[in-house]
Image (cartoon, rainbow, N blue to C red):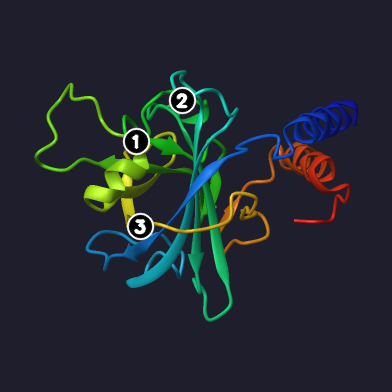
Amino acid sequence: MIVRWAAHRSAERLARWRSAPALHPHGVLCSGTLAVADRTDAGWGVPWLDRPGSYRVTVRWSRALGLPRRLPDALGLAVRVEDADGPGTALDLLFTSSGSGRFGRHLPLPRPDALAGPYSSLLSYRVGDRERVLAAFPVHAPDARRGDARPALWQELARRPVRFELRAAAADEPWRTFASLSLEAVRTAPPTSTVSFDPYAHDLPGLRPTGRLRRLRDAAYAGSRRGRTGDEHDA
């Protein structure tokens, strides 16, 4: 209870000081496509993952602490899959820059480059009958040379689509790809606008985040909203 109260108050004060969300205060909105391919291996036991399909997505890339661009920061990749389970439904997936190893996938990893490494859900999802971590791995263009200084995400988007492979794995499994994500353009939006992603409110049958730390996260997000708007119920 005390920890949730502290998270709420800290987020509220930071959001009020910034006049922006406490975490991931500024970001870039992108439009794109998510494609679930036809499976040739064992299925996931999740209807949405086991049937091929193509979906429009809205993606927000952001820096978690809002540090100056020259400094490494934990990077966020929030994905909203439109009409995922029929018209008017959505699936929200939240990824944070991380490692890909058994332990590193659960820890945020600050980095200066949006495309230098994977992003993971950090916490586990219930995927069919197992708990698995989800992750987004950048797919680099064939002409990208090792060691090159890569442009910022929006600069890369001006040249070509930015692609990720979405994968899942339990602790004792190798990563398996379940979809591809292609970011195609930066979306025009007013600087003050934001999109509220919520993986608990926007999930699918058989594909749900586990409840660990949900109350702490909810307290921090409620504090952030109150700091920005004075209303905890305003998204």
Between disc 3 and disc 2, whose residue precedes?
2
Within 10 angstroms of label 2, few (less than 14), some, or many (20 or more) residues?
A: few
Residue 27 placement, left or right of 44:
right
- Residue 128 seen: no
Mark 3–mark 2 Cα distance, whole angstroms, equals 21 Å
Q: Position of residue 135 (x, y in %)?
A: 41, 42
Q: Secondary structure at mark 3?
A: strand
- Reading the image, the residue beneath label 1 is 152
Where is residue 53, by image quadrant? bottom left
**Which residue is at the front of the view, 170 or 234?**
234
Name the residue at the left extreme.
143
- Reading the image, the residue beneath label 3 is 185
Q: Position of residue 14 (x, y in %)?
A: 76, 29
Residues at circles 1 and 2 in contact by the CB criterion of under 8 Å:
yes
Residue 142 placement, left or right of 5:
left
- In the image, is residue 146 above or below residue 51? above
Q: What is the three-letter code of the residue carrying label 1?
A: Ala
